[in-house]
Amino acid sequence: MKNFDPIWNDIYNRGEQLNKYPYTSIVSFIFSKVKPIKKDGSKTEVLEIGCGAGNNLWFAAREGFAVTGLDASEVCLDFARKRFADEGLQGKFDLGDFTNLPYSDEQFDIAFERSALNQTPKSAARKAVAEILRVLKPGAMFYAEISSNRGTVKGTKNSDGCLINVEGPYSGYGQVCFYSREEIEKLFDGLLKIKSLDHTETSTQLPSPNEVLAHWSVLAIK
């Protein structure tokens, strides 16, 4: 299995999932944990894994954070770079693999991802968490939103825990991994310490058939 499903280049090329505004959960996480300027006068360094169109980092840059995003799709990175340039915002966007981050040890003050780790095989996600551990400063926090197996899950499971040929609410997004609570704990075990773990489910009532989207919200610390 590839760590990055190239279907995402097709999705972005069609102009889909090029989100403009940040997700509320990401805004709440960042503002509840850090301030844009540290006590020594330097900017807080923020890293997003699987940054997509840069919508989450867009808000952070506007608030004065030093932002860095990494994604495996050059298409979405070009979109993010152009948007930042057009608006006069500073940000660094890198093409790369989650399992081999092109950053120095203990470089970032805070990091997050939203539905990126569950788009890569489970063995690769474990390596990605190890890399996040490496690039975070001591005591820094990491927030993740990872798809749950308690939702509507239909597809063919491959050898590394992902579903392919996915049907239902997650169809059209290539390989997707769904996690149980035990798998979430195993993903972080021995690497980052989980401080809180929440589970969210949304049930669609109309149109039929009824389907459930579910994810884990993980707050972890180095």
Image (cartoon, rainbow, N blue to C red):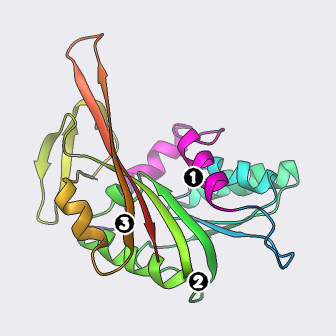
Distance from disc 3 to disc 2, alpha carbons, whole Å, reads 23 Å
Name the spot of residue 99 as percent of width and height, x first: 40, 77
Tag in front: 1 or 2: 1
Crowdedness near tag 3: few (<14), some (14–19) or many (≥20) residues, C-alpha within 10 Å: some
| Helix, strand or loop status at disc 2 | loop
Please, what secondary structure does the residue beneath circle 1 have? helix
Where's residue 23, x and y in %?
Answer: 57, 41
Q: Which residues are magenta?
A: 7-34
Q: Is residue 203 above or below residue 43?
A: above
Which residue lies under the disc numbered 2?
103
Cα–Cα span, label 3 and label 1: 15 Å
User: Distance from label 1 to label 2 (Cα)?
Assistant: 22 Å
Q: Look at the picture and state if 150 lies above or below 135.
A: above
Q: Which residue is labeled 1 in the image?
A: 29
Q: Position of residue 122 (x, y in %)?
A: 24, 66
Which residue is the extreme one toward the bottom?
105
Dot 1 crowding, Cα within 10 Å, few <14, some 14–19, many 20+: some
Q: Main secondary structure of the magenta part?
A: helix
Q: Position of residue 34 (x, y in %)?
A: 67, 62
Question: Disc 1 vs disc 2: Cβ atoms closer than 8 Å?
Answer: no
Mark 1 or mark 2, which has the lower sequence index? 1
Query: Mark 3 = which residue?
Result: 194
Disc 3, SS: strand
Q: Are marks 3 and 2 in contact (CB under 8 Å)?
A: no
Which amino acid type is shown beneath numbered disc 2? Tyr
Query: Seen in the image, is 63 located left or right of residue 25?
Result: right
Instruction: Indicate which disc, 3 or 2, sits on the residue closer to the N terminus.
Output: 2
The answer to whether 161 appears left or right of 10 in the picture is left
Amino acid type shown at disc 3: Ile
**Residue 142 visible to an observer of this rendering:** yes
